Amino acid sequence: TIDSDLLAYGVPKICIFKLFEKEVFRIIDLTRDDVEEGEYKLFDLYKAHGAITFQLYAGCLGCDFTAVRSGIKGIGYEKFIEAAAAVDGQLPAATLAASLWRSFPQILEKNSFDNLTGVEAHLQEVVDVYAQGKVYDSEANI
């Protein structure tokens, strides 16, 4: 593949090609058990919560299914990790949204989110698309 959407669909091992003709690629294997905790924080979150980690990450960074292609501008890797790591227990869209709202309300407001409900709806929409496994209908609508 040329992107990492497959991780959000729950595929645990993928090969991402950067330059196919020059054989430049990266293998991502989420089944490895020899990775030290803390070495890759996103991997730690995946081990704790599963594919929803990548679904929510896509909702924050942007993907084909977000209204704004760039996702939530200002919420990148570090802020996502901080907010997700602050969640106790499960990591559904609602708890990540609440953590983001507590930690970064100004960033969310700059992205036209008026309240926590809007952030949750944005993230849940992305999770639903990935979880259903159906992306586009016969007329290329999401």
Image (cartoon, rainbow, N blue to C red):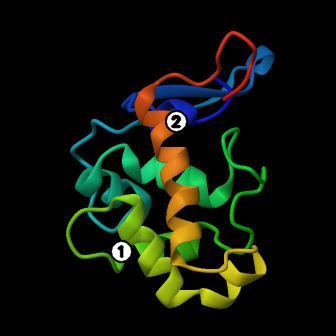
Quadrant of the image for the C terminus? top right
Give the image location of residue 29, x and y in percent: 38, 35
Residue at the outermost top position: 138
Indicate which disc residue 5 carries.
none
Q: Residue at x 47, y 48 (%)?
A: 54
Task: Please say if 113 is above or below 67.
Answer: below
> For mark 1, what is the residue?
85
Q: Is residue 94 left or right of residue 115?
A: left
Q: Residue at x 48, y 89 (%)?
A: 102
Q: Look at the picture and state if 137 lies above or below 131.
A: above
Q: Which circle's residue, 1 or 2, is located before the other in the chain?
A: 1
The location of residue 37, given as percent across then percent down, is: 27, 64
Quadrant in which residue 85 is drawn: bottom left
Quadrant housing the N terminus: top right
**CB contact under 8 Å: marks 1 and 2:** no
Residues at marks 1 and 2, CA–CA distance in whole angstroms: 24 Å
Nearer the observer, 97 or 30: 97
* Secondary structure state at the residue bearing disc 2: helix
Q: Is residue 73 left or right of residue 93?
A: right
Residue toward you, 34 or 69: 69
Q: Which residue is mark 2?
A: 129
Say how many tags the image has.
2
Q: Residue at x 61, y 88 (%)?
A: 105
Amino acid type of disc 2? Val
- Badge 1 amino acid: Ala
114 with respect to 78 (left or right): right
Q: Residue at x 27, y 60 (%)?
A: 36
Q: Residues within 10 Å of mark 1 (few under 14, many from 20)?
A: some
